[in-house]
Amino acid sequence: MISTQDWADTRRLWDYHQMGHRPRPCSVAVGLGSHDLGVADTAVDLYKRGMAPLLVFTGATSPTTRERMPRGEAVHYQERALELGVPGSVVLVEPRARNTGENIRFTRDLLEKAGIDVSSVLLISKPYEERRAYATARKLWPEVQIISASTPMTLDEYIDAIGDARLVIDMLVGALQRLLIYPEQGFMISQPVPDDVMAAYERLRQHGFTSRLIATDTTST
């Protein structure tokens, strides 16, 4: 049973994970691989709106995408973009990355080797991973400006798309945990977490929304 308080806490985390950036023209748009083809759709929409002259899709496969995207997340994203009318000449694929840090590092290296000058990046992720993606990119690619973007949708719409409310809450809790512990491990920049967000996070953990937590000295799965 998901209580009224759980839903209120979930909405607070959802709002915090989104950066609220307004898309603007950038040197390149980078779509971070995942199970969600909506990332590719949003990248295509932003390209067609003139927000970036070049698209990069990055991602290999993971246990959650191996069956659905057997050729790799980035390749399936590329295929989706071509189906939607994007010229193949403006789409690059980075097919090796298996986590957000590798998404950023391998994309940066790909663009450097291609001789493409990058001063700003439109970074496209799942809605609840905007802040995590931003924090990672700011750490690993500090010389460029980062604008976070995702498919515009409400929490309710996202839950409907996933089809599992409890899983979505678990993912929101897990994403916040990483924002708390990854900076000290050198994976991302540190960002302030408001007290009410921390309180919501702790309540949801206490209520058992823990399947996406990673083990630490103070946190168990």
Image (tube, rainbow, N blue to C red):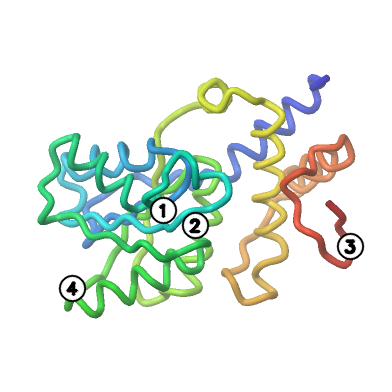
Relative horizontal placement of residue 143, taking residue 113 as reference (left or right): right
Whole-Å distance between the Cαs marked 2 and 4?
A: 22 Å
The one of 208 and 71 positioned closer to us in this rendering: 71
> What is the crowding at mark 2: few (fewer than 14 residues within 10 Å), some, or many (at least 20)?
many
Q: Earlier in the sequence, mark 2 or mark 3?
A: 2
Residue 12 position, x and y percent, is: 67, 36
Going from N to C along the chain, the mark reached first, 3 or 4, is: 4
Task: Say which element carries label 4.
Answer: loop
Residue 111 appears left or right of 221: left
Q: Earlier in the sequence, mark 1 or mark 3?
A: 1
Residue hosting label 4: 116
Residue occupied by mark 3: 218
Numbered mark located on residue 133 in the image: 2
Element class at badge 3: loop
Q: Is residue 95 above or below residue 185?
A: above
Badge 1, how many Cα within 10 Å: few under 14, some, many 20+?
A: many
Q: Nearer the viewer, residue 189 or 109?
A: 109
Question: Tag 1's secondary structure?
Answer: strand
Q: CA distance from mark 4 to mark 1?
A: 19 Å
